[in-house]
Amino acid sequence: MRLYDISRELTTAQLYPGTPPVELRPECFIGDGGFNVKGLSASLHAGTHCDAPLHCIEGGADIASLPLSRFIGRCLVLEVPSERLPPEVFFGKLPPGECRLLLKGGGKAHLSEEAAHDLAGRGVIAVGTDALSVARPEEEAPVHTALLRAGVAVIEMLDLSGVPEGHYTLFAPPVKIAGADGAFCRAVLMEE
């Protein structure tokens, strides 16, 4: 069994423009109190993370309310062109039934709004990407809203560089934070 760590290291991962830098700061030292303790200041959308409906839907579900089944189970890693992806890119490639889909596009593949609606209607229960976002900046709100309103989990900033296209088991549950619009996750793929 081979495991792939597909998470980016939080303190060095590229940040979405305008996101404050991640800060890891010491709060206690072994010499002072017997333990090293560090504090963290970061956007919940830094590094590899999951988005909740609350991210773009007023009154939407928070990250702690989402079913873990969206983030754990069989998935397909699909190499895609590094561009705005129309629905046609996925024809004939998705397995029947519920599907988790991870897009490997060199950090530049983004869904179109049409593709987001199409995937949500075809049994996709999670979409992950190796890009900063599942959408281009000018389509952020409509793409996220289409996916999250349909109950499709969104996982962004994956590191799929060392993962061949194919079927895997995904483990990417978000940290449970009540009231949060997103959360960090440690994403792992297991070969089937």
Image (cartoon, rainbow, N blue to C red):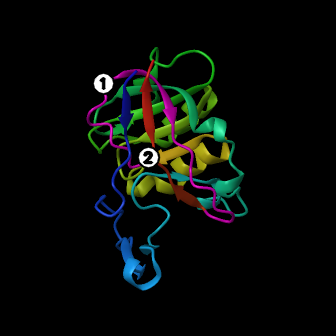
Task: Tell me if residue 60 comes above or below residue 149 in the rendering.
Answer: below
**Dominant secondary structure of the magenta stretch?**
loop
Which mark identifies residue 7? Answer: none
Task: Tell me if residue 125 comes above or below residue 11 in the rendering.
Answer: above
The magenta stretch spans residue 139 = no
Q: Which residue is mark 2?
A: 134
Residue at image coords 50%, 32%: 170
| Residues tagged 1 and 2 counted as in contact (Cβ below 8 A) | no
Q: Is residue 109 shown left or right of residue 123?
A: left
Task: Tell me if residue 38 comes above or below residue 131 in the rendering.
Answer: below
How far across and how far down the image is residue 106, in percent?
26, 40
Q: Is residue 5 shown left or right of residue 99?
A: left
Residue at image coords 36%, 33%: 4
Position of the C terminus, as image quadrant, is top left
Residue at image coords 46%, 61%: 45
In-front residue for pair 25/99: 25
**Amino acid type, callout 2:** Val
Which mark identifies residue 164? Answer: 1
Q: CA distance from mark 1 to mark 2?
A: 20 Å
Q: Which residues are magenta?
A: 156-180
Residue at image coords 37%, 53%: 132
**Amino acid type, callout 1:** Pro
